[in-house]
């Protein structure tokens, strides 16, 4: 068993410099968990960045194979934490054991996938050989590769205590890219953060990597988070959380004397478009599947389907009746934190008091605290379009059915959409072909477009795109899931006339790395 110290991990040492402390709570009982954590000071944050900066200067000369070994070792050491990690995560998030174990598998699988990609790269480097005889001017030897950006600050996400937190996708892709990392743990699951940090420290020691490759600070004060993203030695930020905080941090990164990339995943309502013939033929199964997807994780997934878009046509009545029935049978559920439950309940109250909306149904009543009930509403497309606030994500088990008068209004609705991580379109192949313009318009607003599939569940693979136009993400050209996530933390560099002895392995003539030679 690892003793939880409540300290920060800086340059391989567990440290604290303040007396200020905080605790985490068990959302299902509201009991305070039996650990105390130190709030990082400004000096702690500075030391963590200095450590990452020094380590980066060594890490950038480590080979891809050495970085792969570190990622594999981190996965093994997370698994070695065994039951202790599962129980800590359960008591800090109220997520069930199966979910936490599944998330641990995903986290380790993700780390190993990045390791495998480093050992078996598929993206080529480009080599232009010298042409000294070229007229009228000789051409020099130039080679295009990618280099790591430098120290990256990663914010742990509340809704994925493992897969999007301390050793989650942002950390795994930053380390794979050759960047050092400073994690700012999420204040709702600090024991989970500390345990995973122990695993990473062990892996660093086993692999003989520089100790400051990974640093972790715990804090409940916005000042520390803001200081980290403004630090001149920090070169990029990965963030998953609210639009409000994401906007604050993004602004700070852009107002620095030298702006840095801010990769924020901030919120999405993931609209589900049901075409008229499909609604007429499959209303009941569509409604039941919609509710099942929305209730996964009690609606606390970034891809949870919060909007359904239909026409006032055959099948609508049956769809709404089935939806009402399924929602009313939904049990109340525990949310990740009291703050998230309060925000959800406040947003639902606003929807209840909105005269343009019809309340379709509520699930079983909650008992207060961190619990909440499922809800569904309907609204006309014209009222929805007239009220931009209805586009805001309601983080939790809530769906809004938008009813369009006709094809034209459905198209108008699609064009009014803000940026989304995903959207789905339901229809037969023939019907989809008839709505090709609508499909193209929806594609303009989303990072992932699905056909006849619900959005919950994000595969970690080469072709995944988890991002989208703002506010889904702040960097729609990039993804936070899948192998391409590594590109967020590198930038291209052209190395011209570089002596062979200095060349990185992947650009040397004859390297096993895929090369396009001109
Ligand atoms: P959050 O409030 O955005 O917090 C994320 C991180 O930012 C935490 O580490 C938090 O730590 C820090 N922070 C908070 N206020 C800050 C400020 N003013 N300046 C700098 N840093 C600040 O997210 P959350 O706690 O995870 O959940 C709140 C809401 O975010 C949810 O209700 C939901 O709407 C949204 N959310 C969405 C997704 C998604 O995938 N779409 C995922 C998670 C959350 P401190 O509070 O200790 O400073």
Image (cartoon, rainbow, N blue to C red):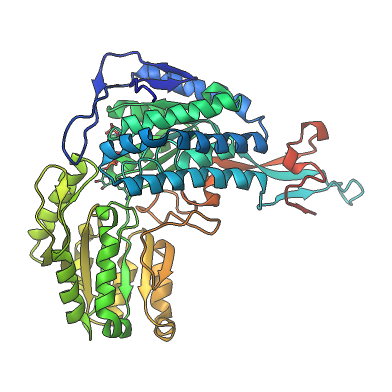
Quadrant of the image where one finds ligand 1: top left
**Residue at horizontal 39%, vertical 73%?**
452
* Quadrant of the frame with the N terminus: top left
Determine whether, in the image, residue 150 is placed left or right of residue 473: right
Toward the viewer: 180 or 224?
180
- Outermost residue toward the right? 133
Can residue 185 be seen by looking at this rendering?
no
Determine whether, in the image, residue 39 is placed left or right of residue 11: left
Toward the viewer: 457 or 45?
457
**Where's residue 232, x and y in %?**
47, 26
Please say if 515 is above or below 377.
above
Can residue 238 be seen by looking at this rendering?
yes
Determine whether, in the image, residue 212 is placed left or right of residue 130: left
**Where's residue 49, x and y in %?**
47, 24
**Where's residue 226, x and y in %?**
35, 30
Quarter of the view holding residue 381: bottom left
**Residue at horizontal 66%, vertical 38%?**
64
**Residue at horizontal 29%, vertical 76%?**
410
């Amino acid at each position: 068993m690892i003793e939880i110290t409540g300290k920060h991990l800086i340059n391989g040492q567990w440290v604290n410099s303040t007396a200020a402390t905080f605790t985490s709570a068990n959302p299902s009982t509201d009991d305070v968990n039996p650990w105390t954590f130190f709030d990082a000071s400004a000096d702690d944050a500075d030391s963590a960045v200095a450590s990452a900066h020094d380590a980066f200067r060594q890490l950038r000369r480590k080979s891809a194979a050495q970085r792969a070994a570190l990622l594999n070792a981190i996965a093994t050491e997370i698994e070695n934490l065994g039951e202790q990690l599962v129980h800590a995560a359960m008591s800090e998030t109220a997520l069930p054991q199966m979910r936490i174990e599944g998330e641990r598998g995903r986290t380790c699988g993700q780390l190993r996938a990045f390791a495998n990609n480093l050992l078996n790269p598929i993206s080529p480097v480009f080599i232009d050989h010298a042409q000294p005889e070229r007229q009228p001017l000789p051409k020099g030897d130039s080679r295009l590769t990618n280099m790591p950006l430098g120290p990256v600050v990663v914010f742990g996400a509340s809704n994925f205590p493992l897969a999007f937190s301390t050793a989650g996708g942002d950390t795994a892709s930053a380390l794979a890219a050759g960047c050092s990392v400073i994690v700012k743990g999420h204040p709702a699951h600090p024991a989970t953060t500390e345990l995973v940090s122990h695993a990473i420290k062990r892996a660093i020691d086993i692999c003989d990597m520089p100790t400051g490759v990974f640093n972790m600070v715990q804090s409940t004060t916005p000042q520390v988070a803001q200081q980290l993203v403004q630090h001149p030695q920090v070169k990029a930020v990965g963030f998953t959380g609210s639009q409000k905080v994401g906007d604050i941090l993004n602004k700070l990164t852009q107002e620095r004397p030298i702006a840095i990339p801010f990769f924020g995943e901030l919120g999405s309502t993931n609209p589900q478009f049901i075409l008229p013939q499909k609604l007429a033929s499959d209303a009941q199964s569509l409604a039941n599947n919609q509710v099942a997807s929305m209730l996964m994780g009690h609606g606390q997934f970034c891809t949870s389907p919060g909007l359904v878009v239909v026409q006032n046509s055959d099948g609508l009545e049956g769809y709404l009746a089935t939806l009402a029935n399924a929602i009313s049978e939904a049990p109340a559920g525990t949310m990740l934190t009291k703050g998230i439950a309060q925000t959800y309940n406040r947003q639902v109250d606003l929807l209840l008091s909105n005269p343009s909306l019809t309340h379709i149904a509520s699930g079983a009543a909650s008992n207060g605290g961190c619990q909440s009930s499922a809800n569904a509403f309907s609204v006309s497309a014209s009222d929805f379009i007239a009220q931009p606030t209805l586009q805001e994500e309601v983080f939790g088990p809530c769906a809004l059915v938008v009813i369009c008068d006709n094809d034209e209004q459905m198209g108008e609705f699609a064009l009014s959409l803000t940026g989304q991580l995903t959207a789905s379109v339901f229809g037969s192949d023939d019907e989809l072909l008839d709505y090709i313009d609508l499909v193209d318009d929806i594609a303009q607003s989303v990072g992932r477009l699905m056909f006849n599939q619900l959005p919950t569940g994000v595969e970690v693979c080469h072709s995944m795109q988890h991002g989208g136009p703002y506010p889904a993400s702040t960097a729609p050209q990039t993804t936070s899931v899948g192998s391409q996530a590594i590109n967020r933390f590198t930038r291209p560099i052209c190395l011209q006339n570089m002596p062979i002895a200095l060349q990185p392995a992947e650009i040397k003539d004859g390297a096993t790395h895929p090369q396009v030679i001109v």
